[in-house]
Image (cartoon, helix red, strand yellow):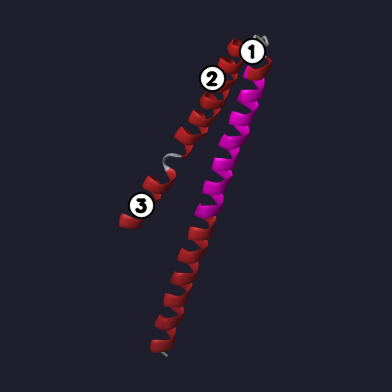
Amino acid sequence: MQQHWKGVGRFGTVGLELALSILLGMFAGRWLDRKFDTGQWLTFVGFGFGVAAGVRAVLRALKEANRQAEREEEEEHRKRREFHDKHR
């Protein structure tokens, strides 16, 4: 049960990281638009960079979750093999 809560803690912030990346990129672009008087171009560029950073964070978390699931599956398979070897 404790393993499940560790997973929630480790991967539960992915959505927040996605949202904050997008907002930070958008607001940074908006600030640059005001500073350089460029209309809304830099807001869109900042938004795009924020989306890219957020998607990268989600993909990174997904890879880590897959690696963790594979490790747990290998461990479970090893334990089953040991159990069957002892009871032959």
State whether residue 3 is above or below residue 13: below
Foreground disc of the pair 2, 1: 1
Identified by mark 2, the residue type is Phe
Which residue does the numbered mark 3 point to in the structure image? 6
Which residue does the numbered mark 2 point to in the structure image? 27
What residue is shown at x 53% (from left), y 31% (from top)?
21
- Give 36 or 30, whichever is nearer the viewer: 36
Q: Residue 64 in the image: x percent, y percent? A: 52, 54
Q: Residue 13 in the image: x percent, y percent? A: 43, 39
Inter-mark Cα distance, 1 to 3 = 45 Å
Q: Is mark 1 on a helix, strand or loop?
A: helix
Q: Residue 52 in the image: x percent, y percent? A: 63, 34
Crowd rating for badge 3 (residues with CA inside 10 Å; few <14, some 14–19, many 20+): few
Label 3 vs 2, first from the N-terminus: 3
State whether residue 39 is above or below residue 78: above
Left/right placement of residue 84 relative to residue 33 reads: left
Which residue does the numbered mark 1 point to in the structure image? 36
Crowd rating for badge 2 (residues with CA inside 10 Å; few <14, some 14–19, many 20+): some
Residue 35 placement: quadrant: top right
* Whether residue 87 is visible: no
Inter-mark Cα distance, 3 to 2 = 33 Å
Q: Give the range drawn in magenta.
A: 43-65
